[in-house]
Image: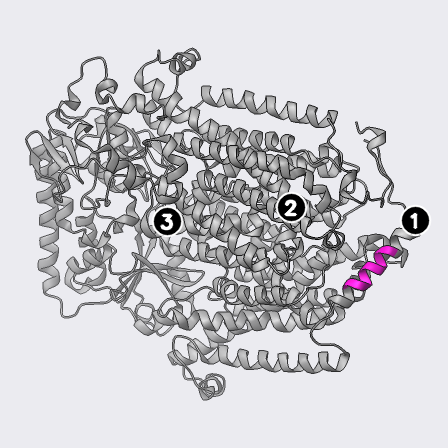
Amino acid sequence: MVRRSELLPAGTRVLGPRGVSLRIYGPAVLVGGVFTGLALFLAMLSITLGDFDMRLRDVPAALTGQASPLVTHIVVDLRLPRVLTGLGVGAALAMSGMLLQRLAHNPLVSPDIIGINAGASTAAVSTIVVVGGTALTIASGALLGAVTTAVLLYLLAYKQGVSGYRLVLIGIGVTAMLTSVTSYLMTRTDLDTAARAMFWLTGSLSGRGWPHAVTIGIGLLVFAPLAFAMARQIRLLQLGDDTARALGGRVQLARAGLLFTAAGLSAMSVAVAGPVTFVALVAPQIVRRLLHERVVGLLPAAACGAVLVIGADLIARTAFGGTELPAGVITGALGGPYMLYLLARTNRIGRGG
Amino acid sequence: MRGPESRLREPGDRLRPSDGTTTKDGWVPMTHIDARTRGVRTLAPILGLTLALGACSPTDGGDGGTTDEGGQAAGDTIQNCDIEVPADEAPERVFAAYQPAIEMAHALGISDRLVGTAYLDAEVLPEYAEAQEAQEYYANIPSREELLNHDPDFVLSGFNGVFADGGDGSFGTRTELRELGIESWIFSPLCPSEDGGTDESIDPSTVTMDSIYADLHDLGTIFGVEERAEEVVTEMQETVSETEEIVAEAEDTPSVVIGRPDDEGFRVTGEPDFSTVLLEHAGAENPFADLDEARNIDVSTEELIERDPDYILVDVCCDAEMTAADAADGVAEIRNDPALANVTAVEEDQVLEFTFADRSAGVRSAPVVAEIAEMVHPELYE
Amino acid sequence: MASHAPAPAASAPILAALRARLQAAAEGAGMLQGSWSRTAGLFVAVCALGATTLASLLYGNQTLALADVHAAYFSYTGSNTDLVILHLRVPRTLVGLVVGMALGMAGVLVQGITRNPLGGPGILGINAGAAVAAVLAITVLGTGALIGYVWFAFLGAALAAVLVYTVASLGQGGASPVKLAVAGAAVSAMLGSVTSAIILTDRTALNEYRFWTVGSLAGADTATLLYATPLIALGALVAIGLTRTLNTLALGDEMARSLGSRIWLTRALGGLAVVLLAGTATAAAGPIGFVGLAVPHVARAIAGPDYRWILPWTAVLAPLLLLAADILGRIVARPEELQVGIVTALVGAPFFIYLVRRRKLASL
């Protein structure tokens, strides 16, 4: 699977950023292609299936405006934007996780852990619990929370630059504070409202409409090109903080740019769908275990994230007898075992990052 | 660029069923709404930039109608939380969500018009058990698609959750449902500040027995069962006033905690909870009535000892099979807690079984008042 | 997939790693240097812990006097004050001490074994395992406060940790730090899914879970103390026995192996100790994540990278933080209480952030 020439002896490191070059790497294209195809297939399936009974031919009819108003409503106003939101959220979360894991050299680092999601969650749960917010105020609150937390994190971690290690530790502290506030709010409210907040906290696509799809779409339009542009800088940063420090200011800039991009992607996705559990952590890990260590694989990761979220949502809204569960319940159940399988099967020891 | 949903919303009549049903003749088309104001109000500043592209959202709330509280018949509509509900043609396919709504539907004798029920906190009252047995029932709120699959023309809800503009666990706002030809009712005076708000945007302490009677009368009119509604109200009023006469004889006003032990100590009801009203009618008082920030409040065991209640009613929650007997574990836990040995309720063996459902305002509130009176004034019932 | 062997004989990378490690250790040396100042510092910390313990007995809903405590034991009258002291304050305080110590030591072990700064008991799936077992017990066995299901919680924690360890051990290279961390995250996510699915469809379970998950000492009674103490003591003994090996492990797997350490044995024993310590603590007080995560870093900042110092410092500082937070939670929001899990994070985290900013913390 891995081309022999790509293999570097253990312990060897290529020094110097010039050693990095763009290559079309076959397995990455294959993995990316398979995940993309799977995501599109699941998307079509999601538009067709649901609690509302309709015939298969109603779907194209609804999309072309030929179906009854109710069926059109179901397909065009409920399912289609929800599917698009899911695809976008999955891709954004996965890319965000990939950038952060590479940045911090730690497979556990994801927006879930370094505090961005925690900030969004605290803000969103406050909106739900304290003022009984609506879809858009919840989303705005979450976005505001995510951005504020990201800025705060960067400022707190900044000390002649930002090291991955310090960022992670500060992230632990900030996350702990925010999470405790969220838990407190959850204990202060009525059971009904707590259930609603819990739904959001698990990460859900329930009731997501066109404004959500448009929001995450814009998020991707802005941040995905940035992510791809920044991905080249990742290898520079993989040399470790000490080496990177020797390389000076360019590294700081690259690191800030990566952090900003990852935070942006995460903030946009958490604003529309809540912190969908585990996607940002597992999608990059899955791709990294399918591809060679040195390949960044941003696109395959994005496709993998989209598959996870859209597949999870499909199960969450069809498999529980007329009641919906949040997609985040299923992402963990889907991604966890696959991750464990890869972990047990692969003969690569795996490094951090 | 406009969101595709605008195709459905703007020509408001497009959704009218083609079979010429006149159910919606009474409703005011949305033409009087200032679309710009709506947009500005609901697009919060942060998302404003990005979401502006989505134009008006499908989640807008409020129809800008008049703002009288409570239901009032105006022509052939009745106002319910800023929404004019048509009263000229009785709904035939009703979905009822939450305990108070389900029980009220049965009480009004419209059980055969129910197409689905959801989210009970306890067993329904024994007199409705048979009627409920025949219903399709969801333990949790079903999805919006599942609701639409029942082809309902009316949603009757005890709380605002199902009409929340929050996505999760919501059927959609009442305005959105109306666009699909579905009318709705939320128990007054639980009106959210605007359509789409949740129960967090209301003040639960405004609920009284009279609000239950008002709902019964209004729903009686809407469903064309005015006489039955009047019977139910009269029966409830009699029960309450009989109880009040009995407890007027009482020499003292026992302090009654409604709550249950939990990991943190005790979760008790505060002033805004409807149980405060129930206790008052039953000649008792809530020792935690000074806590007015939330319906449910966690207090430490030490605090409970200090307040030394005469009675503790242990309320259990929440599923369709729950009865007061399920509180037995909680009762035993309190009785056996060595730290509580000196509390009057424990000393006098006055820790009793209760349910959470009994605390919600609805047709069961009158029998619950009588039940509480009998529990806390046993001397008057000998 | 082509494999590259872990190059057992290549000494150059090992020496390089050792050099880097020594340099890092030098940079990351604690605030207190030398055995004498570390011992003296530890003595001061123990005194502070003693004072906090006393305060925990006296402050709460009502402020009591030392004489009341004395009277409760030696001239018992069955008054409310006596009952509060014997059945609420004393068990709560002692459970706080034991649980705090357990959480801190478990954090040290996990961070030592996985060499991951994000290592807390949660990393081995302990919290997720305890939560899913307790929530399952509620759904299957009926209503009741989660605290009543301690044994389920403990069993769940243990099974989750075993699963994490087993999966991480499969494949080449054994249970490496990265594989442990990733397997822990994957198992936690899986179990978390089950927990979420249950609490989102069973309101009774949600109602218990949302309180349990905060972490609190308020439910602690004498029975809690009686089952928690022996298990935690056993775990602490194993932890103490492992400190020397943890120091070796800190040099990296290859280095440790060449120094003659049986890495798998250390990891397995460490895992066992973590289950005993954190599993019991979580069963007794709910998942209080921040203590195990942050206090070892604080101890490392104070006492340097030597685990023989980190462990005792953590064992003193962790209960200090937990008890102080519990006292604060009792008095700031009267008549309500703030759960200790919340206060610990709100009070501890700013200090932790300050410390992280102030010093270059020794990396793991």
Say which of marks 2 and 3 sits in front.
Answer: 2
- Check residue C130 for magenta coloring: no
Establish if A246 lies above or below B133. below
Give me the disc on residue C94.
none
Q: What kind of residue is marked 1?
A: Ala
Q: Residue at x 30, y 17 (%)?
A: A69
Disc 3 chain ID: A
Is disc 2 placed on a helix, strand or loop? helix
Residue most extreme to the front: A249
Q: Which residue is mark 1?
A: C10
Where, by quadrant of the figure, is residue B378 drawn? Answer: bottom left
Look at the image and give the residue range highlighted in magenta. Answer: C16-24
Where, by quadrant of the figure, is residue C211 drawn? Answer: bottom left
Magenta stretch: helix, strand or loop mostly: helix
Q: What kind of residue is marked 3?
A: Thr
Distance CA(mark 1)–CA(mark 3):
58 Å
Q: Which residue is mark 2?
A: A254
